[in-house]
Image (cartoon, rainbow, N blue to C red):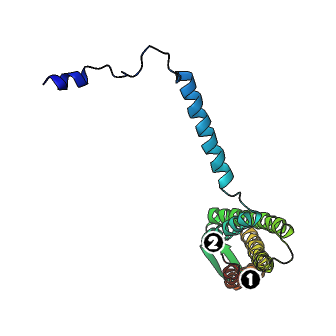
Amino acid sequence: MAPHNLIYSRPLFFLMTKHQSSFWTTARALATIGVILLIVATAGCVSSPAETATDAAIKELLAAVEAQDIGLGNITNIGYGFVDGEYVVYSSDPAGLMYAHEKFVESAEHVESAKQHLGEARQNMYVDDSENLLLNGRMFQAALVVEDIAQFGINLTSELQQTSPNATACIVNAELIYRFIPERDDMLHLAGL
C-alpha cells in the first residue's frame, strides 16, 4: 500500500523544479488560434476554383429556361372564338398573364447575361481548344433559341393583356413558342445542360 501512495503523492508537474510563467498566455493562445484559422480560411479560398464565365453562362441559361417554364405555366384561362363574325382571343386571368409576362422578361434578361458570359468565355479560350469552343458554340445557339422563346412570350403576354388582343398575333406567337420548345430542349441537351 505504501508504494501506491508514493506514486500519487508527487505534484502533477514534478519535473518542473521551479515556478515559471507559462509561454502560452491567453493572448498568445488566442493569437495562435487566429493565425491558424486565417491560414485555413485562406487555403480554402485558394483551393476552391473560381466560377468561370462558362459556369455563369450555364446558370443563367438554366435560370432563363426555368423562368420561361413558369411563364408558360401561368398562361391559363385563354378563351377564343367568333364574336360578331370576328375571331377573338381573351383571358380571364389577368394576374396570371402579368406574372407570365414578368417571367418572360426575366428570361430575356438571363439570356442576355448568359450570352455575355459565353462571349467572355470564348475570348479566354485557345484556338486549339476545339472541344470547349464547340461546347461554347452549342451553348450560344441554345441561348439564341431561348432568347427567341422569351421574345415570343413577351409578345404573346403583351398582346393578351390588351383590351382587344389581336387574335392572329396571339396565335402566331403561341405557335412559335410551342414550335421552338423542343428545339430549345434539344439544343440544351447538345450543349450538355
Mark 2: few/some/many CA within 10 Å (<14, 14-19, 20+): some
Extreme-front residue of the structure: 3
Q: The residue tagged with tag 2: helix, strand or loop?
A: helix
Residue 69, disc: 2
Residue 73, disc: none
In the rendered view, would you say 112 is above or below 167?
A: above
Residue 30 locus on image (x, y percent): 55, 28
Residue at the (77%, 76%) spot, across then down: 132
Amino acid type at circle 2 is: Asp
Extreme-top residue of the structure: 19
Q: The residue tagged with tag 1: helix, strand or loop?
A: helix
What residue is pinned by disc 1? 176
Q: Name which quarter of the figure residue 168 lies in.
A: bottom right
Q: Name which quarter of the figure residue 53 lies in.
A: bottom right
Circles 1 and 2: CB distance less than 8 Å?
no
Mark in the foreground, 1 or 2: 2
Residue 146 locus on image (x, y percent): 74, 75
| Image label count | 2
